[in-house]
Image (spheres, helix red, strand yellow):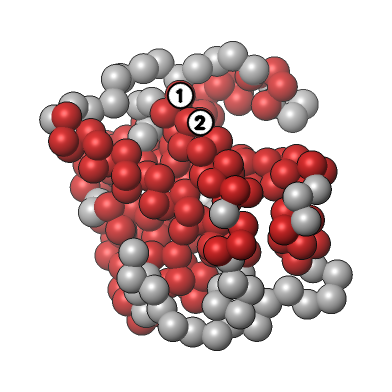
Amino acid sequence: MAEVDVEVKVHPPGDRDADLWQGLMAGAPEAAQALCARYGPKLLSFAAARFPHDRSLAEDIMVQSLADAARHIAWYHPRRSTFAVWLYGVARRQIHNELRRQRRLKSVPAAAQTPLTNAVELSDGRDVADEVAARLQAQRAVAVLSEVLSDVELEVLVLSSIDELSIREIGLVVGRSERAVHSLLHRARTKARERLADDER
């Protein structure tokens, strides 16, 4: 991944990511737990956007990304990016490694049904049927968009719309300038609107 050589001011006093980073550097078990709790769901949604038909694979990528981040925490440099940007970069490498592996094998992820296990736990008090229906709808939408968007267009769209990263943060994750990210987002949103509008006709 191309790196953008930008010095970023990060980790103001009391910043939770700074505390998390320092805890991981010290090998504190509670820091590893906090890493999983804070970023596990976000990295899962990021991976699931690339593998919408294989939830198990997305979960594996999320777990491996968190494990790699904890194992290689010394590679993180706070003067170069925020902790979240670095972590998404770790997950992005895992995703691209898996895509390359699948291309070599000339295979695609199995078209698995959306797992409904733990739906009650994940519903956060909402009606389970509504939660499952929403997840199915989101999965279908991502699968449709993955047919018309390039890899990087899908990435910037997910990072912006789902993970709510800033334009600068997205640029650091995907190795593009802010101007390029704006262009990619505009193109991705235009394609997404046109594709989803076609489905509604």
Q: Is there any visible trace of residue 69 in the rendered image?
A: yes
Indicate the position of residue 102 as horizontal and vertical percent values: 23, 34
The quadrant of the image that shows the N terminus is bottom left
Q: Nearer the viewer, residue 79 or 72?
A: 72
From the viewer's perspective, tell me whether residue 54 is left or right of residue 35: left
Instruction: Tell me the quarter of the picture where residue 81 sits.
Output: bottom right
The quadrant of the image that shows the C terminus is top left
Residue at point 34% right, 52% down? 154
Q: Which residue is mark 2?
A: 59
Residue at point 25% right, 46% down? 195
Q: Nearer the viewer, residue 48 or 161?
A: 48
From the viewer's perspective, tell me whether residue 15 is left or right of residue 194: right
Indicate the position of residue 123 as horizontal and vertical percent values: 69, 26
Residues at marks 1 and 2 touching, judged by CB atoms closer than 8 Å: yes
Indicate the position of residue 84 as horizontal and vertical percent values: 60, 61
Q: Nearer the viewer, residue 196 or 69?
A: 69
Q: Is there any visible trace of residue 164 in the rendered image?
A: no
Above or below, comparing residue 65 to residue 129 in the picture = below
Residue at point 72% right, 54% down? 24
Q: Which residue is mark 1?
A: 56
SS for callout 2: helix
Q: Nearer the viewer, residue 194 or 80?
A: 80
SS for callout 1: helix
The total of numbered circles placed on residues is 2
From the viewer's perspective, tell me whether residue 26 is left or right of residue 147: right
For badge 2, the amino acid type reads Glu
Q: Residues within 10 Å of mark 1 (few under 14, many from 20)?
A: some
For badge 1, the amino acid type reads Ser
